[in-house]
Image (cartoon, rainbow, N blue to C red):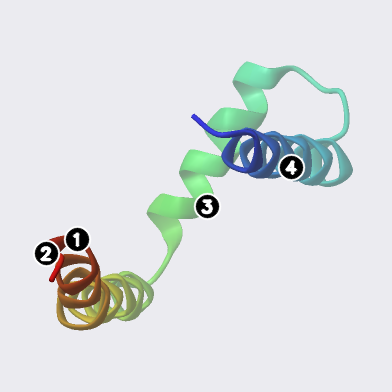
């Protein structure tokens, strides 16, 4: 793992921890996890359909755009 990826992962973890503590504070983690699960269960099915569609479009874009460019670069002359 290169240093840039490690740095980016550390920033993501730090942002997640700061978001968690800003939202829930330093309460009991087990209770707040159950609150998060209750919120996710209570979401409308359309939210999951939209999120699934976005993930699907991102995956197709990855397959169509990134992978062919990577194969063309690594194929050589």
Q: Do the CB atoms of the residues marked 2 and 1 lie less than 8 Å apart?
A: yes
Camera-nearest residue between 53 and 3: 3
Disc 4 secondary structure class: helix
Tell me what residue is drawn at x 88 percent, y 33 percent. Answer: 25
What is the C-alpha distance between the residues marked 3 and 1? 45 Å
Q: Is residue 56 above or below residue 39?
A: below
Residue, disc 4:
11
- Residue 75: mark in rendering: 2
Query: Where is residue 57 shown, x and y percent of the image?
Result: 25, 81
Q: Residues within 10 Å of mark 2 (few under 14, many from 20)?
A: few
Q: Residues within 10 Å of mark 3 (few under 14, many from 20)?
A: few
Residue, disc 3:
39
Residue, disc 1:
74
Circle nearer the N terminus (3, 4): 4
Q: Residues within 10 Å of mark 1 (few under 14, many from 20)?
A: few
Disc 2 secondary structure class: helix
Q: Nearer the viewer, mark 2 or mark 3?
A: 2
Camera-nearest residue between 60 and 35: 60
Tell me what residue is drawn at x 76 percent, y 34 percent. Answer: 17
Camera-nearest residue between 24 and 5: 5
Q: On the rendered structure, is 6 left or right of 63?
A: right
What is the C-alpha distance between the residues marked 2 and 3? 48 Å
Q: Do the CB atoms of the residues marked 3 and 1 lie less than 8 Å apart?
A: no
Disc 3 secondary structure class: helix
């Amino acid at each position: 793992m290169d240093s840039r990826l490690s740095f980016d992962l550390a920033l993501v973890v730090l942002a997640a921890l700061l978001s968690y503590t800003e939202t829930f504070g330093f309460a009991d983690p087990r209770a707040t996890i159950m609150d998060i699960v209750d919120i996710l269960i209570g979401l409308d099915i359309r939210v999951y359909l939209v999120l699934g569609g976005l993930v699907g479009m991102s995956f197709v874009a990855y397959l169509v755009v990134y992978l062919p460019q990577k194969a063309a670069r690594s194929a050589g002359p």
